[in-house]
Amino acid sequence: MARPKISPSGKEITWSEKDIIVSKTDPKGIITYANRTFCQVSGYSAEELVGQNHNIIRHPAMPQSVFKFLWDNISTGAELFAYVLNQARNGDEYWVLAHVTPNFDRNKNIIGYHSSRRVPKPAAVEAVKGLYKIMLDEEKKHSNPKEGMTAATNILVGLLTENKVDYGEFILSL
């Protein structure tokens, strides 16, 4: 199944704070496991998700530069927290606080990733929405997507530098 082109519905999905969305991927982001909560919230069955790229749930309002930043960091073996807007199968949206960690083999090679996603704090979502809009607008200004992602990432890096925090501190402070 190719990544579906689904128009956003503008409706937000909520789920219990007791539940955690869990997925595992291979090193290239292909889903190898999706828990029941992931399936319920996204509207896809486990059979539909497994074997697909994790971007199957990417919302078009999410800057691609955020995902590049995420991949650049986790591919070094680091863990990362991020606020992410996802899109369900029916076009509804849902925000998550994602915690992504690499899985290693005995030789410390990355063999995949594990992501646990929780219900985010509403105030944190509001804080990050403005930043993501600025970054997405910057990406759209450039005809070359790579240049757009670099320019948008520079906005994020500038914010971190200005506040004298690293990305993890920034995310957890929201």
Image (cartoon, rainbow, N blue to C red):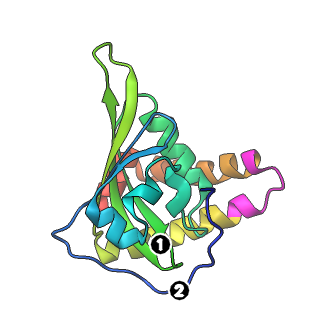
Badge 2 local density, few (<14 within 10 Å), some, or many (20+)?
few
For the residue pair 9 and 78, the one nearer the viewer reads as: 9
Disc 2: which residue: 10
Q: Is residue 157 above or below residue 11?
A: above
Task: Say left or right for 171 vs 160.
Answer: left
For the residue pair 172 and 16, the one nearer the viewer reads as: 16
User: What range of the chain is rendered magenta?
Assistant: 138-146
Residue 140 magenta-highlighted: yes
Residue 45 magenta-highlighted: no
Can residue 165 be seen here? The reply is no
- First in sequence: mark 2 vs mark 1: 2
The residue drawn where x is 63% and y is 78% is 7
State the separation of the CA atoms marked 2 and 1. 11 Å
Badge 1 local density, few (<14 within 10 Å), some, or many (20+)?
many
The residue drawn where x is 27% and y is 63% is 36
Residue 21 screen position, x and y as percent = 29, 60
Disc 1: which residue: 88
Tell me the kind of residue under disc 1: Ala
